[in-house]
Image (cartoon, coloured by chain):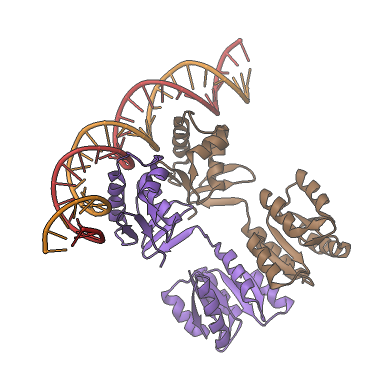
Chain colours: A brown, B purple, C orange, D red
DNA sequence: TTCTAAAGTTACAATTTAGTTACAAATAAA
DNA sequence: TTTATTTGTAACTAAATTGTAACTTTAGAA
């Protein structure tokens, strides 16, 4: 498990590296937002620990503009301990917010919790979908889906509990801005997908789209 | 959303009740573990806020022996602020751990996070409308509406507390700039919709339009 | 209170939509 | 190159949705 620490205080970086490695994590430390951004271009860590006050900018903005888009769980770790900052950080979508000075053990406990929750595996009824591996299992037995079927299912799982419209599907999977496109293709694909899944996890909303619900 | 607070300090109970109710939550307060246990026999709240030091026992044990078994998300809220207690509480499986004195706003932000509050749900009387799933529930039982009926209702919910005129309906749903269009179609649709909803949430304003009011 | 226009109600035929199956073209693998 | 797999299209079926017409009721103005 890879954790990225964005923090300019070198002492914190050093002591965290030691503690986290003892707990089986790999810690990468970046001391500025620009270095972090560069790192994130080529690597996707499992979790980010983010300081707010950094030499080349503000962590809140970085969270909103960069991290949210690539969807990596984040703990904000900062000296900014005002109620407003904490509430703001949490409401922005940070998975946790810790104020300095902090307990390393507590941080590790909170990291463990978040990584446990943010497993990239979703199970709905008898179907298990692994986002990282892009594998679909039915009762733990891998299904063989074609690339397009997989993309389709991926889109549905990415929008778990949300309706995905046919036009969005055509747009995302076929890169077509649905106007005079053959709409039936979507129907046929869902038919194939449903047959392979042999499970009623895919809901059809006539005239609207398709949806998978969490249980 | 029902939240159970297990806490013997009556002042905390009172101020939390007020704040949480402002945020759309229902708070039930129990001042001892035995009372809480009794309550949990007949009801399943969506979240529990648990104090540790209670007149008839220890919150940690209660969490392990009672709450974990019925699997309800829990925030531990206590004066026990030692690193050991915090780590212990989190590792036991509590969803969060806050120490007293605490900020009510932060608590609410953490509650929201845990409940993953979906702001895209509106409830009016016995009808619940889920914008994400595009489902309408009557007393939590899904109604089967046709696409146009759903669009119609969607329009009314989007304009909650505001009148939607017939011409706007024709314009939005039927893409017609209402002139010589058959106006009665709208009437018929509202008739069908009202019949399915079997609830008096849709108000008719003769000569003006239709409206749904928040409670 | 009466009258009238607006809204409610019911029934039905026409249309739309999704599901299904089959097949040929395109692509990838042996 | 041959073979297998994947992909897009077409034709058909079944079912639900939709719009209209004809008739009734209601609310508010005169």
Point 72% across, 76% down: residue: B84
Point 56% across, 89% down: residue: B55
- Residue placed most toward the observer, A8 or B83: A8
Determine the residue located farthest toward the bottom in the rendered image: B55
Q: Is residue B202 left or right of residue A151?
A: left
Determine the residue located farthest toward the right in the rendered image: A10
Relative to B19, residue A75 above or below: above
Residue A76 visible in the current orientation: yes
Q: Is residue A151 left or right of residue B37?
A: right
x, y (%) of residue A201?
46, 47
Relative to B160, residue A81 above or below: below
Relative to B98, residue A29 above or below: above
- Residue placed most toward the observer, B46 or A62: A62
Q: Quadrant of the N terminus of chain A?
A: bottom right
Q: Is residue B192 left or right of residue B158?
A: left
Point 74% across, 54% down: residue: A62
x, y (%) of residue A104?
78, 69
Point 55% across, 42% down: residue: A155
x, y (%) of residue A5?
79, 58
Q: Is residue B8 left or right of residue B144?
A: right
């Amino acid at each position: 498990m890879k954790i990225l620490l964005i923090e300019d205080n070198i002492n914190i970086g050093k002591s965290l590296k030691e503690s986290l490695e003892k707990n089986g994590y790999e810690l990468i430390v970046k001391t500025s937002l620009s270095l972090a951004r560069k790192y994130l271009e080529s690597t996707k860590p499992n979790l980010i620990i983010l300081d707010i006050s950094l030499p080349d900018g503000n962590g809140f903005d970085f969270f909103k503009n960069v991290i949210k888009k690539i969807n990596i769980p984040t703990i904000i770790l900062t000296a900014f301990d005002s109620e407003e900052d904490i509430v703001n950080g949490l409401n922005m979508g940070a998975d946790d917010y810790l104020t300095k000075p902090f307990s390393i053990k507590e941080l590790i406990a909170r990291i463990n919790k978040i990584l446990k929750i943010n497993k990239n595996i979703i199970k709905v009824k008898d179907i298990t979908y692994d986002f990282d591996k892009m594998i679909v299992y039915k009762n733990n037995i891998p299904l063989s889906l074609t690339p397009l079927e997989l993309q389709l299912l991926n889109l549905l799982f990415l929008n778990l509990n949300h309706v995905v419209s046919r036009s969005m599907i055509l747009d995302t999977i076929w890169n077509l801005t649905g106007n005079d496109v053959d709409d039936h293709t979507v129907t046929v694909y869902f038919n194939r997908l449903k047959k392979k899944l042999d499970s009623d996890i895919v809901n059809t909303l006539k005239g609207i789209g398709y949806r998978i619900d969490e249980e």
